Amino acid sequence: MSRDSVLIGASMAALVVLSLLTFFCSSRRRRAVHTSSSQRSVVDDVELGRRPCATAAGLDEAVLAAYPTTVYSSPSPRDSAGERSKEEEAADTRCAVCLADYADGDELRLLPGCRHSFHRRCVDDWLRRRPSCPLCRSSPPPPAPS
């Protein structure tokens, strides 16, 4: 055997050994991550910048219940005072969480501070996970004590 073929053979053997070590280390790591993540019930939330081990940072039920609600009724053409763009009109008649248009009789929740409104059920689910408005990302102020 020539010196070059011995060098090539040794390089190939080292490459195979290195590849096998990498494979076994990564599969062991994957198994450890899968086991630990299945034991936790907290879900990753990229918007909050949380890691899986972080706790939920949303609003509690008492605060949500204190925010005002209203029943939606579609505006008549004579209700609009002044010219508004179609985008502005759509923002007033569509829930930004589920992207569905409001229908007569839908219960809406009005967030204090920014005054944005959403379907009550949609925004309550949102606010239980993240304490900010889905549109402007401002944090609604706490409700005034009764």
Image: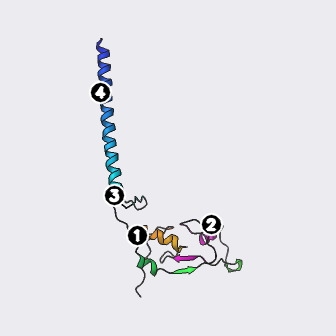
Q: Residue at x 49, y 74 (%)?
A: 114
Q: Is residue 131 above or below residue 47?
A: below
The residue shown at (49%, 76%) is 111
First in sequence: mark 3 or mark 4?
4
Mark positioned earlier in the residue sequence (3 or 1): 3
Which residue is at a point 33% across and 33% down the rendered structure image?
A: 19
Task: Tell me the amino acid under the disc marked 4.
Answer: Ala
Q: Residues within 10 Å of mark 4 (few under 14, many from 20)?
A: few
Q: Amino acid at mark 1?
A: Gly
Q: What label sits on residue 58 in the rendered view?
A: 1
Q: Nearer the viewer, mark 2 or mark 3?
A: 3
Q: CA distance from mark 4 to mark 2?
A: 63 Å
- CA gap, disc 1 and disc 2: 30 Å
- Disc 3 crowd rating (10 Å Cα; few below 14, some 14-19, many 20+) is few
Q: CA distance from mark 3 to mark 1?
A: 22 Å
- Are discs 3 and 4 less than 8 Å apart at CB? no
Q: Is residue 113 above or below residue 53?
A: below
Spot occupied by residue 100 in the image (x, y as percentages of width and height): 60, 67
Quarter where residue 145 is shown? bottom left
Mark positioned earlier in the residue sequence (1 or 2):
1
The three-letter amino acid code for the residue at tag 3 is Gln
Q: Upstream in the sequence, badge 1 or badge 4?
A: 4
Mark 3 sits on what residue? Answer: 39
From the image, tell me which residue sits under label 2: 87
Q: Which residue is mark 4?
A: 14
Query: Which of the two marks, 4 or 2, is nearer to us in this view?
Result: 4
Residue 126 in the image: above or below residue 32: below
**Residues shaded magenta:** 87-111
